[in-house]
Image: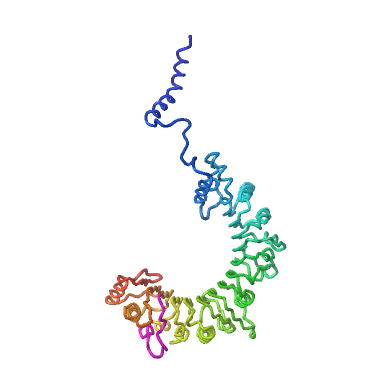
Amino acid sequence: MPDLTYLRRKIDHHTPKTSLDVTAAKYLPGLDSDYAHPIQSLPFELVSSIFLHCLPEREQLHPLTAPLLLTRVCGTWRAIALRTPKLWCSVFFELFNVPPSLLPSKIQMLKYWLAHGAAHPLTIHLHYRQPFEDVVPLISAQSKRWEDVDLFLHPSTLAAFSSAELQLPVLRRLSFGCLPLRDTASSLHITAFSDAPQLADVSLLKLPPSAVALPWAQLTRFYCQSADLPDVLGVLHRAPALQYLRLDLQQATPLEPDCEPCEHAALLELTIHAHPAAAVPVRALLAPLTLPALRTLELPPIGPSDIAPLAAFVTRSKLGKSLHRLALPLAPLAPDDILAVLRPLLALEQLELHYPSEAPLLDILHTLVNYDAPENDGAFLPELRAVYIDCYRAAVPYGALLAALEARYSDDAGQGTVQLDSFVLTAMTSSVPEPADLLALRLLKTHGMDISISHVFGGSVV
């Protein structure tokens, strides 16, 4: 006869399961061992499409995000995920301060990822600042699939690109850079990207244009973070199809006095940035340039000696009916200087001035009030819709400002003149408007005009 203690243990062991079964039978009568979730009945193609919508836009390779997460739910989902190459065609991979002990697992994960993309075009975001020599050969083996590539590497790995000539039949966009180079930048010559028949958009970070061989004739966009002043003309001469050019000047080597004229018929946007305190000879840069298709122009700081060359450039390029946006950092200017540049710009829609002194702002405000005066040879900036004034150096002239805004926001602003919709000003000096002016400015804002007036250290006024 069995021991009673043994029987009680057996009963206790089965009681929880029995209770659970009774409860399930009571509240979930349709539940049985053959139950399958409705998603299991969907066709492969539909589930695969749903999986694609689970992908994060920019996410590190991680087991808890798609697509790796989808392989860990069940065998069916794993099979579908591994048979959907598009899930594995975007690689966002960053290695910052990775301990050496973890590097092999990271590399293995990257190999696993690349292996499941089949022949589909690849989007790669790969940034690392340590000398990992195994990574470059791994991704270079997939170069025929590169479509959109963003590489920021340790300088020691650049040698792999210096001698290589990769096959890049579908590469359309390239962002390529490395940690700053000091002594080797002038001798560096990377040839890996010269054979890319569809490449149109290139960004170079911490590398000068001379360091990388590119198919210049077909480029439509180019950005360089470590440019010199002569690179402006050099890039335009080499890239006749270029539409968008942005250069951040790290130095401003003087141009040759007899440099070759450069007329570029395709360029739509020219952006040249420099430190506000940098002495950039803008007049020498503009003298050889003619850009008749230009719609956006951003230049380094403009001084009094640059006004006449800038006005001549506007006239020579016939920008009066094409330029829509102008952004200028300004050194202190004499009265009427800025008007020599602005008066011809009949199509200008957006004006941005950085660090302006009192004279140019008052010139603009007074002329906006008298927009149809005879000396303006027609309406002054008749298409102007937005004005942005950043780091204004003097006390805000609220009276002149209010008069200009009321003149250009009213329904009878003038025949052929659009309403000024937006005015944003930040000032270095704190000042407060008269109560009547403040009330009028707030009334304009209530009626729909986008007005923002603030002080860098004092907060918002309007």
Q: Residue at x 57, y 76 (%)?
A: 266
Colour mapping used in the image:
rainbow
Q: Residue at x 64, y 75 (%)?
A: 238
**Which of these two is toward me, 116 or 98?**
116
x, y percentage for residue 272?
55, 74
Q: Which residues are magenta?
A: 365-385
Residue 100 in sight in this render: no
Q: Residue at x 46, y 86 (%)?
A: 340
Furthest toward the top, the residue is: 1
Can you say which quadrant of the picture contains the C terminus? Answer: bottom left
In screen coordinates, is 7 left or right of 282?
Answer: left
x, y percentage for residue 411?
31, 78
x, y percentage for residue 151?
61, 60
User: Mostly what secondary structure, the magenta segment?
Assistant: loop
- Determine whether 220 is above or below 259 in the image: above
Reply yes or no: does residue 278 show up in magenta: no
- Determine whether 50 is above or below 250 in the image: above
**Which of these two is toward me, 249 or 147?**
147
Task: Tell how many labels.
Answer: 0
Q: Quadrant of residue 261?
A: bottom right
Residue 119 in sight in this render: yes
Q: Residue at x 42, y 74 (%)?
A: 388
Furthest toward the bottom, the residue is: 374
x, y percentage for residue 31?
43, 32
Furthest toward the right, the residue is: 163
